[in-house]
Amino acid sequence: MLVIESWVINDDSPVPVSSGLVPEALRSRIDSGQLETWLTSSSGRSLAFVTNTERAMVMLLEEEGDSGEHAVDPGAEGSSDGFVLSNGQDDEYPDEDTVPIREAFRLVKQIVSTGSWPADARWVGDR
């Protein structure tokens, strides 16, 4: 029997968020100025989503202290700033280490739905 893990948005309700509603929840948080979102799965994994509203850093970590893996956009040039963390830190990332916001929503939706990156996703391990 396959058991799919459930995911919750860390500082929202303890009720699991469905994969179908996670993009809407992320958009709502962005609209309210929350550019950093952490989700935690029932198996203890973490999913980070940090955006500047145009691009996003999407990271998947297996456990606390894990360096994880993150989505990439090979061939993207330049860098973007405005990735504001909940502690007020304003980060800048190379565009190749972030993805366009629509792609980020798709990646997060897939991970929440299946626990894995989409087959066509580009990502690198940071371990």
Image (cartoon, rainbow, N blue to C red):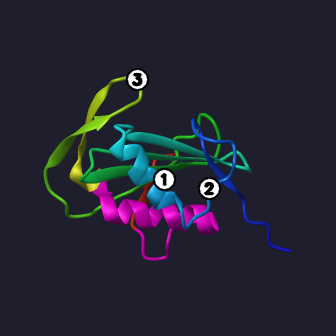
Across and down, in percent, residue 1 comes to 86, 74
Q: How far apart in space, not on screen, are marks 1 and 3 (Cα)? A: 20 Å
**Residue 45: in magenta span:** no
Q: Disc 2 and disc 3: Cα gap in Å?
A: 24 Å
Q: In this rendering, does residue 35 appear at all?
A: yes
For the residues labelled 2 and 1, say whether their Cβ atoms are less than 8 Å apart. Answer: yes
Q: Which residue is mark 1?
A: 25
First-in-chain label (1 vs 3): 1
Q: Could you tell which of marks 2 and 1 lies nearer the N-terminus?
A: 2
Q: Tell me if 127 is positioned left or right of 1 in this view.
A: left
Tell which residue pokes out farthest to the right in this image: 1
Give the Cα distance between marks 2 and 1: 8 Å
Q: Earlier in the sequence, mark 2 or mark 3?
A: 2
Q: Is 77 on the left or on the right of 126, as rendered?
A: left
Task: Indicate which disc residue 58 carries.
Answer: none
- Residue at left offset 39%, top offset 38%: 34
Q: Which residue is mark 3?
A: 87
The span shown in magenta is: 98-121
Going by the numbered disc 3, the residue's amino acid type is Asn
Q: 127 or 39, which lies in front?
A: 39
Relative side of 7 to 72, left or right: right
Coordinates of residue 8 in the picture (x, y in percent): 63, 48
Q: Position of residue 63 (x, y in %)?
A: 65, 42
SS class, disc 2:
loop
